[in-house]
Amino acid sequence: YKGKKLFPTAKVIGGYDFVGEAWDGTATTPPLAPDPDPIDCGGAVVKDGCTGGHGTHVADIIAGAQGVAPGATLLAIKVCSAVATSCSGIALLQGMDFALDPNRDGVTTDRADIINMSLGADYGQPGDDDLVAAVESATAAGVLTVASAGNGSDKPYIAGTPASAPTALSVA
């Protein structure tokens, strides 16, 4: 659903879609199709538009009217598939860069204060992927990254990347 303007709003002040609506991460996936509208239709389409996917749900928990930080504003940065559970490694890195410089002018004074990633690779070590380096760069710029450490099932010792980054706030 890309017809109705659902952003920006007073709550979702900016964002970007780095994957598009059709990319699914499989061997036969359509190519990434970035566009400036981050609103996805990963959830059900309702009368007035999309309900959103997992990221929309997490954003509501964080900054919705009944969330833990209802006064917060958001950048909606879409880096995962709207039709599958895959996230694009390229889009993840581009999304981290976007969070550090949303207006892309080379100045990071408009950066996000916190990056939340409810995603990750199971059993990852800090040196396993470039996303950990991006988390460390964000920290150096003054941005806290909160990342999921427990999306890998009900098994002990599952913590992955980017939650294993030395400066990430890892949440299970």
Image (cartoon, rainbow, N blue to C red):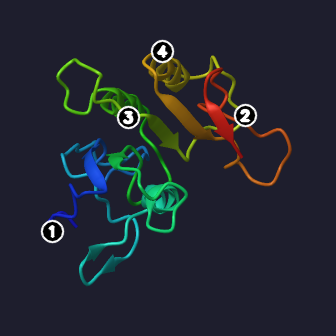
In the image, residue 91 sits, relative to residue 104, either above or below, namely below
Q: Amino acid at mark 2?
A: Tyr
Foreground disc of the pair 3, 2: 3
Q: Which mark is residue 123?
A: 2
- Residue 56 x %, y %: 42, 60
Q: Amino acid at mark 1?
A: Lys
Q: Which residue is mark 4?
A: 140
Q: Nearer the viewer, residue 115 or 45?
A: 115
Q: Residues within 10 Å of mark 3 (few under 14, many from 20)?
A: many
Q: Residue at x 80, y 54 (%)?
A: 154
Q: Residue at x 27, y 45 (%)?
A: 15
Foreground disc of the pair 1, 2: 1
- Residue 136 x %, y %: 53, 18
Foreground disc of the pair 1, 4: 4
Q: Residues within 10 Å of mark 4 (few under 14, many from 20)?
A: few
Disc 1 versus disc 2: distance between alpha carbons? 40 Å
Q: Which residue is mark 1?
A: 4
Q: Amino acid at mark 4?
A: Ala
Disc 2 versus disc 4: distance between alpha carbons? 25 Å
Q: Secondary structure at mark 1?
A: loop
Q: Residues within 10 Å of mark 1 (few under 14, many from 20)?
A: few
Residue 134 in view here = yes
Q: Earlier in the sequence, mark 1 or mark 4?
A: 1
Disc 3 versus disc 1: distance between alpha carbons? 26 Å
Q: Earlier in the sequence, mark 2 or mark 4?
A: 2
Q: Amino acid at mark 3?
A: Ala
Q: Earlier in the sequence, mark 3 or mark 4?
A: 3
Q: Secondary structure at mark 4?
A: helix
Q: Secondary structure at mark 2?
A: loop
